[in-house]
Image (cartoon, coloured by chain):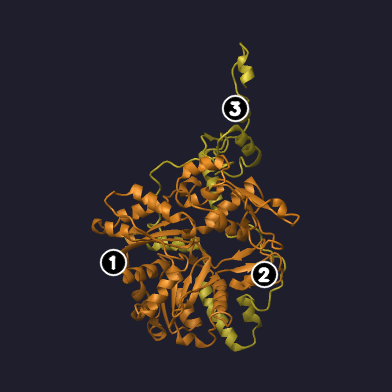
Amino acid sequence: MSKSSKLPNEKRESSRIKDADGRRVLDDSSRRRRLSRYLEYLEKDNHNDDPQANLNIPSKRYLPFHDLEATSVSSKKKKKAKGHDNVQKRLRKNFAALLEENIQQNGDSDEPNYVTATAPPPKYPTRKFCHVCGFPSNYICVTCGAKYCSIKCLRIHQDTRCLKWTV
Amino acid sequence: MAIILDNGCYTCKVGFSNETRPRLMLNSIIKAKSERRTSFISNQINDCKDLSGIFYLLPLQKGFLIDWDLERQIWDYIFSKENLNLNVEFQEHNIVITEPHFNFTPVRKSMAEVVFEEFQFKGFYTTAASTLSSRSYLRERNRHYCVVIDSGFSFTHVVPYCHDRKLARAVRRIDVGGKLITNHMKDLISYRQLNVMDETYVVNQLKEGACFVSKDFFADMELAKNSDRKVSCKYVLPDFQNIKQGYIQDDKVESSLFSFDTYYIVKLKNERFTVPEVLFNPSYIGRINQIGISEAIVNALDATPREIQPLLYKNIILTGGNAKLPGFKERIFNDVRSITNADFDVQIFSPEDPVTYAWECGAKEVRDGALDNLFVSRKEYEEFGYNICRNRFF
């Protein structure tokens, strides 16, 4: 880098930029997709898999309700399970579906609702922190748009998370 | 006497109205790596020795009660002999259950259905947790206006109240809560030091034990850069054999004093305060394009009538688990003070235990009979169905 610039007839260039030329540059929309994937990740309850997923031994006390219905002998139990099934049927929706329904219902009305209560976007520019070390950063990775603060952090970033996550 | 159930996304706060403190119950069914055959309902997890690699099944999604299959099992456990000891006495008790702001109608309907038809309670009242807090706060102090900040597991709400009514148009919701903070912390530690992606429980403990809200963010950044003792620390992770609970390592004690062969240490520098900082500047994590708590308070109060704004600024109440972070109150005070009009007198009230405050307020309200004519009885429900709940509560 600095050495090459000292030679008289050679064009000044940075090896870092030269390297970067070879890398694929992501456009805005895919960067945004990556960001929303990170958000989804932050909303997750668990990151590990269910440790009992492939065990397949339903414990007797907590049978799923459809099993309960099938196996229960006493009619009382049966009734209870059925009543519960109705609730489940009506509410077999996830959050996204409920929200969608809510938006449709409130489409034209002026009433405040879940959507109108969302906090507005900030007035001030966002702060920038190095994605690797967490300290204030001034630079942006050309490839994926993550922030970094020094060449050292950039190297780490390119070796690890570049094109995987962006923060 | 009634039962008050503050049905939070992570913990339920539950108890009878004549008690002073609620029982804290995890609102989840938990599977542990170490015990392969059983799953633990709520606080049964205390019997589990090894809490690594815990798998949560949460009935609430983003604060809304979605999975009744799970919730019913948890409530069954809560009301069972070990806890509230309600075996046959559902018919003799009223119950107050909290719900999120702007709850969805299908969720409300099924809530009423479960309470009356399956558990057969005598009477039922539902409202947002912050409404309980505000009612009791205002009545005790004989005031009329307040704003409740409820920063919980799934989101943070800023809710201004006028007498007993929430000013619905001025409610602000920030989609940042304890879960997001924990996950962010988990990601940072896993990326920078040690893979803890499976250890939600451990990282949550670490967050509660080691994080703080910075009063001067960039000054603390400088301190962290120089690894100043004031901000950086070493946190010992539990291994669930010798160390049951993680803790901040004391620098004075030589680490050679540890007799265990292996234990894991996480070095925390700027993570200690940049992670809770998400509450105040959500925009720095990618797509959460929202204002932070302090700005949200000002933004919400700007949407209220001018005449009551000074009174609202005088009565800011902090509740919810995140309010337990050290420095939370001071930071909000500093921020709000510097953003808002200098004429306003900013006063912040931070209850002793912000997690259970809403429950305690609910219990007080029931004891003083302030909710008496709000309960819908089972007879009324059988007669009029869900409509009577809608007309009376919302």
Q: Are marks 1 and 2 on the same chain?
A: yes
Q: Is residue A29 visible?
A: no
Q: Which mark is residue B144?
A: 1
Find out whether the residues at labels 2 and 3 contact each other: C-beta distance under 8 Å: no
Q: Colour of chain B?
A: orange
Query: Which quarter of the figure is the C terminus of chain B placed in?
Result: bottom left
Q: Give the farthest residue toward the left.
A: B307
Q: Is residue B89 visible?
A: yes
* Frontmost residue, B257 versus B244: B257
Q: Is residue A77 above or below residue B390?
A: below
CA distance for labels 2 and 3: 54 Å
Q: Are marks 3 and 1 on the same chain?
A: no
Q: Is residue A101 above or below residue B92?
A: above
Chain designation of label 3: A
Q: Which residue is mark 2?
A: B48
Q: Colour of chain A?
A: yellow
Query: Which quarter of the figure is the N terminus of chain B placed in?
Result: bottom left
Q: How many neighbours does mark 1 have within 10 angstroms: few (below 14), some (14-19), or many (20 or more)?
A: some
**Image coords of residue A48 (percent x, y):** 65, 58
Task: Give the residue at x 51% y 47%.
Answer: B285
Residue type for callout 2: Cys
Secondary element under disc 2, as helix, strand or loop, is loop
